[in-house]
Amino acid sequence: MAATAAMAAELRRMVDESTETTYDDELILAIIAKYPLIDALGTDPIEYDYTTEPPTASEVDNWIPTYDLHAAASQIWDEKAGAVSDEFDFSADGGKYTRSQKEEMYMNKSRWHASRKSPKAFKIWVSPRLDIEEENNA
């Protein structure tokens, strides 16, 4: 399953992109899909890398689509900052124009969302500890 339209709408609000001029829905959904999370039941998202066998239907169906929207928002704010990075401050006709503030604000937004990303989690399988003698003989 993929990201939903509701997730795309929420991400649009997070990055102040109310129109599809720069980021259309297909691109927004693709960015969201880059940040899957372990779902509420502890199921890992399936990541198929084309070098192994494809996942079975039961493996795919068990994961509840869960994505890190803050990570996606941080990426978009980074992209927006890069788009305005060439703007500079200048003075003309008695006025002072500080256009570099836009990049600084975008980077602040990116850092804000990056600080709220979900921690990367993984499962640890603990096996019983070997006795000292077994460790020495191994």
Image (spheres, helix red, strand yellow):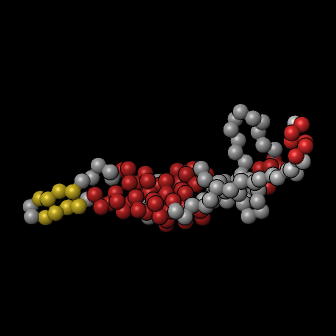
Identity of the residue furthest to the top in this view:
51
Answer with left or right where residue 68 lies relative to residue 61.
left
Q: Which quadrant would residue 21 be assigned to in this image?
A: bottom left
Q: Residue at x 86, y 42 (%)?
A: 135
The quarter of the rendered structure image containing the C terminus is: top right
Q: Is residue 82 visible?
A: yes
- Taking depth in this image into account, of 43 and 132 the one nearest to the observer is 132
Q: Residue at x 79, y 55 (%)?
A: 62
**How far across and down, in percent of the image, does residue 5 sit?**
60, 61
Q: Residue at x 90, y 48 (%)?
A: 131
Q: Residue at x 54, y 56 (%)?
A: 72
Total labels: the figure holds 0
Answer with left or right where residue 34 lies relative to residue 126.
left
Answer with left or right where residue 25 lies relative to residue 17.
right
Answer with left or right where residue 84 lies relative to residue 40.
left
- Taking depth in this image into account, of 30 and 39 the one nearest to the observer is 39
Q: Which quadrant would residue 6 be assigned to in this image?
A: bottom right
Q: Is residue 21 visible?
A: no
Identity of the residue furthest to the left in this view:
93
**How far across and down, in percent of the image, does residue 116 sit?**
55, 64
- Say if 136 sits above or below 126 in the image: above
**How far across and down, in percent of the image, does residue 29 sit?**
57, 54
- Taking depth in this image into account, of 44 and 63 the one nearest to the observer is 44
**How far across and down, in percent of the image, does residue 126 sit?**
82, 52
- Taking depth in this image into account, of 130 and 120 the one nearest to the observer is 130
